[in-house]
Amino acid sequence: SWNDPPVVKYEITNTAKKHHLLNKRVVENETKHQASASSNKIELSDSECKSYISDISEKEFPVACEDNETSENLVKRSETLPLSDEETLSYVVRTLQKILDETADKSEKTTKDVNKRIDIMKDFWNSKLSKEVKNKMFELAQELEKGNIDAALKIQWSLMMENVREVKSWMVGVKHIIEMKKEKTVPDKLQNIDSSSCL
């Protein structure tokens, strides 16, 4: 008969087995997928990770690192000065004035304006300028005296970026003197080259 108990029991058992097999297949597929994903992972040790990050930093951001180092060096060099405030001011003014006096082809108006800016710096020196600004100006004067125009321009740029409130009213005069020194240095170098070639 169609409703015979053994047959019904057999069908139920058979169905349960099929359902169990289906579950097995799903688990097996998931296991294979996990194994495949895990095989594609790359394990790196701590030292390898640090080395990788270091390589990326050096290759991708060399300019930023270089800028930071330059700024740090300027701050370190500006921490101490061998001279008093008065001696530092005297040296800075004397160096700037010497370049202004030695520069040819300068108009009277330009000279007057630059001197005015130097006078403003002198007035601000004792009461309105920080130690950092004084130290940087001392270094700038030293670089100009040595003929290191690029180094002087870097310090001048640093002052304008980091201390603009203190220097904005007179720094244009210092920048003008740096340009004068630069214009004077180029002909001097060309003259030295011509003299050596004649020998």
Image (cartoon, rainbow, N blue to C red):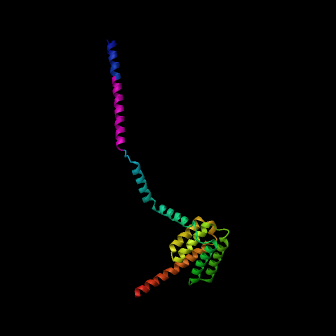
The secondary structure making up most of the magenta span is: helix
Identity of the residue drawn at 34% across and 33% down? 28
Task: Please identify the quadrant where the N terminus is shown.
Answer: top left
Q: Residue 25 at what x, y percent from top left?
A: 34, 31
Q: Quadrant of residue 180?
A: bottom right
Q: Which residue lies most toward the front here? A: 82
Identified at 48% across, 61% down, the residue is 65
Which residue is at a point 55% across and 74% down the rendered structure image? 142
Nearest to the observer: residue 1 or residue 96 = 96
Picture coordinates of residue 157 (x, y %)?
Answer: 55, 68
Q: Which residues are magenta?
A: 17-40
**Residue lying at the far bottom of the rendered structure:** 198
Relative to 192, residue 14 above or below = above
Residue 158 horizontal/vertical position (percent): 56, 67
Point out the image quarter for the C terminus. Answer: bottom left
Q: Is residue 33 left or right of residue 171?
A: left
Q: Nearer the viewer, residue 158 or 138?
A: 138
Would residue 62 be seen by someone viewing this image from the given angle?
A: yes
Task: Locate residue 166, reporting x and y percent.
Answer: 63, 67
Quarter of the image for residue 122 reads: bottom right
Count of labels shown? 0
Residue 98, magenta (yes or no): no
Q: Please indicate, yes or no, whether residue 2 appears anywhere in the rendered image.
A: no
Residue 26 lies left or right of residue 140; in this view the side is left
| Placement of 1 over or under 22, stated as above or below | above
